[in-house]
Amino acid sequence: MNNCRIILKMLVVTMVQLFGDEKVILTAVGEDREYDKNNNATDKVLGTKYTVACPKRQYETVTVKVPGSVPVITQEALDNAEGPVWITFEGFAGRIYQMDGKVGVTCKADKAVLVTGTKARG
């Protein structure tokens, strides 16, 4: 079967529309690498990818890519944090796509910003 991915380019969603809030919990930080035509990661780093959990969406996880950026926190610092690390994104754009009959989202932002002074909400 053809692995066709249809991106609805005209449908761009905001953080609030997608996450239900202007901030989310950071769960992982990694390099966003370029992939070759065989879908294998190359050595070329395009930026940083942040995996986040959305408390207002039953802690669904989403990855946000920030091109050409230095991470705002290392994975080691995130792992050693005493509580949840909250993050927001400037210039955020989420795009909805459909592949093999399933709907997904791809997210990019211009900048990642750690949120300070945030307490857990019940």
Image (cartoon, rainbow, N blue to C red):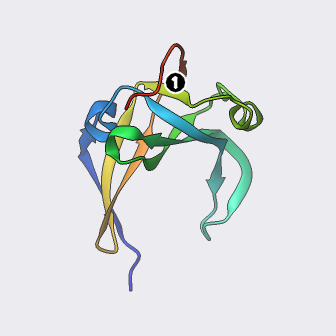
What is the quadrant of the N terminus in the image? Answer: bottom left
User: Going 77% across and 36% down the picture, which residue do you hit?
Assistant: 76
Q: Which residue is mark 1?
A: 111
User: Going 69% across and 29% down the picture, which residue do you hit?
Assistant: 81
Q: Is residue 84 left or right of residue 60?
A: right
Residue 117 lies, in percent from the top left, at 51, 13
Q: Residue furthest bottom?
A: 1
What is the quadrant of the C terminus in the image? Answer: top left
- In the rendered image of this protein, does residue 81 appear above or below residue 119? below
Answer with the quarter of the image where residue 37 lies: bottom right
Crowding at label 1, few (<14), some or many (≥20) Cα neighbours within 10 Å?
some
- In the rendered image of this protein, does residue 86 appear above or below residue 43? above
User: Going 32% across and 57% down the picture, which residue do you hit?
Assistant: 97
- In the rendered image of this protein, does residue 66 appear above or below residue 111? below
Residue 39 lies, in percent from the top left, at 60, 67
**Front one among 17 and 37:** 17
**Front one among 104 and 1:** 104
Q: Residue furthest left?
A: 10
- In the rendered image of this protein, does residue 117 appear above or below residue 79? above
Residue 35 lies, in percent from the top left, at 62, 58
**Front one among 84 and 6:** 84
Secondary structure beneath label 1: strand
**Front one among 53 and 112:** 53
Q: Is residue 62 left or right of residue 66?
A: left
Answer with the quarter of the image where residue 41 lies: bottom right
Q: Is residue 42 left or right of residue 52?
A: right
The residue type indicated by label 1 comes to Lys
